[in-house]
Each structure stands twice: as C-alpha cells, then as structure tokens.
Image (spheres, rainbow, N blue to C red):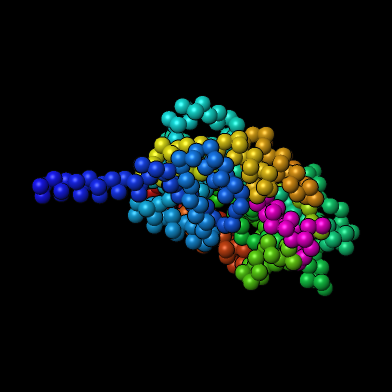
Amino acid sequence: MRKWLAAALAAALLAGCSSESGDDGPVTLTYAVWGQNDAMQQLVDAFEAKHPDIQVELQVNPWTDYWTKLQVAAQGSTAPDAFWMLGDRFQTYASNGQLLPLDDAIEKANVDLGVYPKVLVDLFTLNGKHYGLPKDFDTIGLWYNKELFDAAGVKYPTPEWTWADVQAAAAKLTNKNTGVYGIAAPFNRQEGFYNTIAQAGGYVVSPDGKKSGYDDPKTQAGIQYWIDFVQKGQSPTPQQFADTDATAQFENGKVAMYYGGSFYATRFYENAALRSKIDVTALPKGEKRATVINGIQNVGYAKSKHPEQLRELLLFLGSEEAAKIQGDTGAVIPAYRNTQQAWVDSMPEFNLKAFLDQVPDSVVYPVSANTAVWNEFEETHLTPAWEGKQTVQQAANSLAAEMNEALAKE
C-alpha cells in the first residue's frame, strides 16, 4: 500500500512539473529585447493569435543591461527562449553552442533567404549554419540642419556630394561666435569611421577574419577624414562629446551635419521642434560610395525547453507579415524585401529613401570570432589620435599590431 501511495505521489508530482513546463497546456516562451518598442508587442499579439497554444512573454531591458544579463543567463542555462542578436556578438554565442540552429525549420517551411539583404544573412551564418532570420537593418545617412545651412548661405547636401563638399561646407558652417560647429566628428565606429574607411578603399578586418586593415594607408585615410575636422575646430572636441554626446548636440542645434543611422529617424521625428529643421541624404562619396549596414536578428536559445515552438516563433518573426507590422509602426527598416516603403512613408517630412538607396553600396559591419577584444584595442589606440596626442599613422599602426595578435588567437 505504501509503495502504491509513493508511486501515485511521484506520478502526481511529475504531472505537476509537466503542466508547469507547458506540456499539458499553452507553452510559454520568453522573448528578450532592448528599449521600449511597441512594435514588438504587436508582433507578439499577432503570433499568439495564430498560435493559441503558444504564449510569448516579452522581456524589455535597457540597452545598458541587456548584454550583461544575456551573457550571464546563457552561461547559466537560464537565457530567454528568443532574443535579439547583433553581428558583432553573434559568433561568440554561436560558436559556444548557445544558439538554436534553424536550417531544418527553414528548409521545411521553404523559407527563401533571398528576400533578405545577403550581407545580413551572411553576417549571421557560421560554418554554413543559420541561427535566425533578419529582423531589420540600418544604414547611415548625412543628417543636416536646414536652418544652420540657410544662416550660413550654404546649399543643402545632395547624394552627389563628395568628401570635399562636406569639408568645404563644414568650414563655412562653423561659427565660433554662435558656438555652432560644421559637423560632429566623434569616435564612432558604425556611424563614423567604419563608413569612411570603406569609402577610402580600406578595411577594418579581412574577410577571413585573420588580418587587421589598420596598417593600410587607405584605412588610415578614412580615419584622418574625421581627425581633420577636430583639429581644424570644425567639430566639438572629444571632451565636449564626453559632456554631451554627438546626437544630442545635433538635436540642440550645435552641429550642422551629423553622420547618423536610420535608427535615429523616429527619435528625431518625435522631436516636434526639431522635425521641420532637419533632413537627411546619402553619405558623401570618397574614393567610392559605401555605408555600413547592420541589423538585428532574432535567435533562439539552444537549451530552450520548447525548441519546436521556439522555431515557430522565430520563423514568424522573420516573416513578411512581421516585417509589415514593423514597417507600419515606423520603428525600424524591416529586412524583408519590398516591405520598407511603409517605413519611408511613416515620416514623410524626412528623405528616408536615402537610407534604402544606399543598400547596393553597403558594406557589412566588421566582425570576427571575438570582435569585442579588438573593439577595446580600437578605443585604446585611436583615442589619442582624436585627442591630437598621436598621428593617425602612429595610432593605427599600433592598433594593427595588437589586433593581429588577437586575431591569431581566435
């Protein structure tokens, strides 16, 4: 009798655990993102409507906490089921077996990867395996303050502008009496020198991830472009940027030109006082045209208790339906082909088409197996050049040497 009671109790406990895990009822998946994003809740609602047996708990984290929490959770086997991933961190998670491969699900659902920008698909592919579908993308544009251009008698920038045009305009727009600078030239990878390095014909890291490009004269020319603005007093100094970042200085009317991502469009648009004063165009041409393209990919945790339901969620988040929802909100540029026009139309006062027009000239955000290591070296070695303590050549050559040592260990 006691044995029977014990067996019955054990069975009841197991059934309770199973129910809590979702096997006898709706499965609950967690989905982690950063920032406040109403579009993500709309996506969750749309998915749940199609999958009443799957519930999705949206977890919104500040950017400053997101990666720290994710790293700890992934190592402790408690990561969210689905979460956002960036290209510069992807290989670390994928190579450590922390991401759920999606190739079988992609093949079974006949997903056409050609509907996404190829550079983004490649960015999130490791050893031939796919771990997600692109959610959105961003490129960089030349934002400008029309009021400051009018006051200085300078014509607005166009897609035909070159580096020389920006340099000439920065000189005319800089006004020490009013405290206005022609351009913002902060230490900025994605929105700054990665673009001009590519435009100069240089490179940050070789395609195979084995060699630094910082000792290449063309790469150094792409960095020198920014240093010149600071040294000529046409941009705020590094200390001024430390006190007030470049984006805020542009919003405050202290700088006339700002290399900024498409992801700032909503922020600028929601600033009613700023909206009518500014616009955006394509980046100026160096030796060639180029803009950095980057984006977010939805990925899944390899140790999820519900991998099949998780795959369903990830496929939906990369679908045309999900892309249209995102585009209609104006939050981001959806990655799915032919769904971007809604984003452009959502803020008609801005020339947002400029961001889409540059996609054919885009270069993928530079990454390797352990990008974070040499990102730190970039700050260590290049900051003295921005501060005028070293020449670009000295700083970049030192960076290349240390970066090559790090790449050799990957």
Rendered location of residue 18, percent (x, y)? 31, 45
Residue 272 shown in magenta: yes
Rendered location of residue 399, percent (x, y)? 51, 56
* Residue 68 appearing in the image: yes
Q: Is residue 21 left or right of residue 379?
A: left
* Residue 393 appearing in the image: no
Q: Is residue 56 left or right of residue 41?
A: left
Residue 2 shown in magenta: no
Q: Is residue 73 left or right of residue 321?
A: left
At horizontal 69% and vertical 54% (from top left) the residue drawn is 266
**Magenta stretch, residue numbers:** 253-276
Residue 251: quarter of image: bottom right
At horizontal 62% and vertical 40% (from top left) the residue drawn is 323
- For this orientation, the residue located farthest to the bottom is 177
Rendered location of residue 253, percent (x, y)? 77, 65
Please state which of residues 280 and 174 is positioned toward the viewer in this rendering: 280
